[in-house]
Image (spheres, helix red, strand yellow):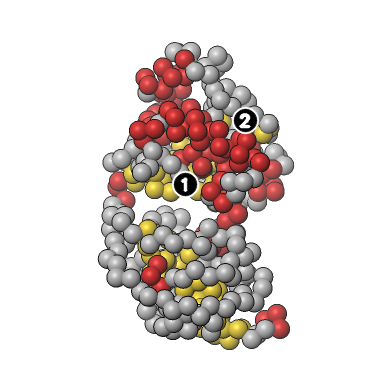
Amino acid sequence: MKKLIKFLVILPLFAINACGQNNNKTIQKPKTIAMENVISKPENPYYSNTDTKKLTVSDAEWKKILSPDLYAVAREADTERAFTGKMWNSETKGTYYCATCGNKLFKSDQKFSSSCGWPSFFEQENKESITFKDDNSFGMKRIEANCGRCNSHLGHLFDDGPEPTGKRYCMNAVSLDFVPDGIVANIQEGNYETIVLGGGCYWCVEAVYENLNGVKSVASGFAGGTIINPTYEEVCTGRTGAAEVVEITYDKSITNLDEIFEVFFTVHDPTTINKQGADVGTQYRSAIFYKNEEQKKAAQSIIAELNDSKAFSSKIVTTLEPLKKFYKANEYHQNYYANNKQQPYCQMVIQPKIEKFEKIFKDRLKK
């Protein structure tokens, strides 16, 4: 903490189609030994990466649990726009699971590069993992692919894939969870913690924490306010009381709450009320949404320490608010910087924050 205070004293703040595809390439399956993870979704009691027992859950119940974009695809058979899902062109080795129930679906060595704009696979993990039925919607004859455990819509199956199967499983990225190889198997829940922070535009905050060693995942979304599961458009009005936030999941054996807060108070201005740069409104307030007394006391402690040391020229106005519920934003807002680096906002607003973070925390960056 003293490192942060010293720095702040010396340096001021920086400011739907048919999925056409033609691919005759033969895929050679590499021999890999994968270490698989177990994903924890406390808000979803039906989610499991090991339980294969079939689920019978009503759509009404799923709607309470799933994010709006995932519900639309999984339960209403919607289709995400091509080239928008973050996994469509990924070559990272790992395992793909159903984002609705956690059922294992594919390994990365069953995936191939496709020009259709959605993640594409030539084979499923096992014959029970995905089921099929005829789909004659929109005047087309297609084969719908559904999760074998929860019967959620995943995408479609086509006969234009590579050898050895000649099949193409065209999947919606939002319907998939992915765990890279090399992550220690079976996460021990006790080693992981989450904290929800609001530091202005969530695109900025997410991009920074994605690079901090020990951070497992960062999700952009909303917290606070009076509306259940607000949309981005509703929050943008500034009248919902909700703030743009990120939910950070981190490994307590690699990083800790103090360091998470150090980064937080370094990359945004905690002294401006409902404002970060040109972003103005209650949705951009500086806020820490604590889920327990430990987080609350840690936040109170660092704020008091920073104020006492006059690390900032003005008093910190960061609000401390109990976390009632975190609502994940739709897929378009996840990994926004990584997917839109050429956008002016990314170059002029987000990139300087990342550069500042990398300079100060250079020894704590992910390798």
Foreground: 121 or 101? 121
Q: Earlier in the sequence, mark 1 or mark 2?
A: 1
Residue 95 higher or lower than 214, as above or below: below
What SS does tag 2 mark?
strand
Q: Residues within 10 Å of mark 1 (few under 14, many from 20)?
A: many
In the rendered image, the quadrant that contains the C terminus is top left
Q: Amino acid at mark 2?
A: Gln
Picture layout, residue 310 above or below residue 126: above
Res 35 → quadrant: bottom left
Q: State whether residue 266 is above or below residue 307.
A: below
Residue ID at (62%, 69%): 79
The reply to whether residue 264 is visible in this rendering is: no
Q: Residue 144: image x %, image y %?
A: 56, 80
Q: Is residue 65 left or right of residue 124?
A: right
Residue located 39% across and 81% down the image: 128
Circle 1: element type: strand
Three-letter amino acid code of the residue under disc 1: Val
Q: As displayed, is residue 99 above or below residue 362?
A: below
In the figure, is residue 34 to the left or right of 97? left
The x and y percentages for residue 105 are 42, 72
**Residue furthest toward the front?**
25
Residue at image position (39%, 48%) is 216
Q: Which residue is mark 1?
A: 218
In the rendering, at what x and y percent does residue 67 appear? 56, 58
Residue 189's disc is none
Tell me, for residue 276, which label it has, or none: 2
Marks 1 and 2, Cα distance to the nearest angstrom?
A: 20 Å
Residue visible at 50% across and 76% down?
Answer: 169
